[in-house]
Image (tube, helix red, strand yellow):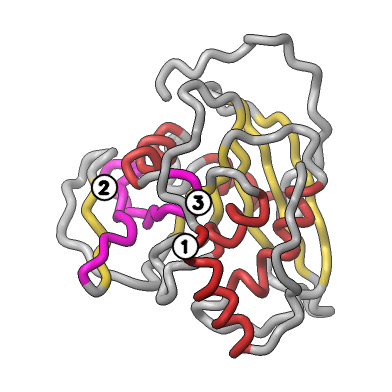
Amino acid sequence: MDIRQLHPWEVSLEEARDIQSRLASQVSQFDAISEQPRYVAGTDISPPDPNGVAWGAAVVMSLPDLRVVEVKRAQGKPGFPYIPGFLSFREAPLVLSALEQLVTTPDFILADGQGLAHPRRFGLACHLGLFADTPTIGCAKSILRGRHGPLDQERGAWAALEDKGDMVGAALRTREGVSPIYVSVGHKVDLPSALRRVLACCAGYRMPEPTRLAHQAAAGRLEEREPEQTPAGAYQAAFF
């Protein structure tokens, strides 16, 4: 998978803030995901081990059957401190290294992190989307920015996540009676499409399958996998 180089990663906190503010204007909220996507990639990163080494992972799954097609990992020492609001400078380099190894090009990416639901409207999902030039959706386990009202208990219920008068994402119930996840636009997608795609990628767990398995891969619990040859037209994205 081709990855662009938009800026260096070894930067100061002030430089990182300036980069986020500058690149935020390049985020697209126009839905560019095809009507019948064939592949989705999920990404995540492991905590550093005692030697400071972490693993980034990318897991490609077919649609709509959510079968694992390809798994790639990349290791390294994060070069940026853990600072809320700047996690992409710590996590994105390893995730992008894993994405760059992919033979299968995903139609969209699910990132374990925020998109527009970020103080400068430029979270990890936005960063990955711009570097990969691919539709990307943020799927976070907790809120970084914004508030939402109550939502029903059934699967698929959602409530707008608002910050300073802006709708920056949504709280989405992916499993009945389970705490919601927080979905936001990363790049080249609109929020209604993002909610629909995320929900269709869930298979009985709180988190969508691509990011759930990427978490396992980053932790070393899912082995790397090369893609198999797939006959043309083998998948029909019936519910997308």
Q: Is residue 99 magenta?
A: no
Comparing labels 1 and 2, the label whose residue is closer to the camera: 1
Q: Secondary structure at mark 1?
A: loop
Residue at the (28%, 39%) spot, across then down? 156
Side (left or right) of 197 relative to 19: left
Residue 107 in the image, given as x and y percentages of width and height: 59, 34
The quadrant in which residue 8 appears is bottom right
Side (left or right) of 62 relative to 122: right
Q: Residues within 10 Å of mark 2 (few under 14, many from 20)?
A: few
Q: Earlier in the sequence, mark 1 or mark 2?
A: 1
Question: Of the residues shown, which amino acid type is indicated by label 1?
Answer: Gln
Dot label at residue 114: 1
Comparing labels 2 and 3, the label whose residue is closer to the camera: 3
Q: Is residue 169 magenta?
A: yes
Side (left or right) of 93 relative to 66: right
In the image, residue 38 above or below residue 91: above
Query: Label 3 belongs to which residue?
Result: 187
What's the distance in space between the residues labelled 2 and 3, CA to CA? Answer: 30 Å
Q: Check if mark 2's residue and mark 3's residue have beta carbons within 8 Å.
A: no
Residue at the (78%, 40%) spot, across then down? 102
Which region is colored magenta?
165-189
Q: The N terminus lies in which quarter of the figure? A: top right
Q: Check if mark 1's residue and mark 2's residue have beta carbons within 8 Å.
A: no
Query: Label 2 belongs to which residue?
Result: 177
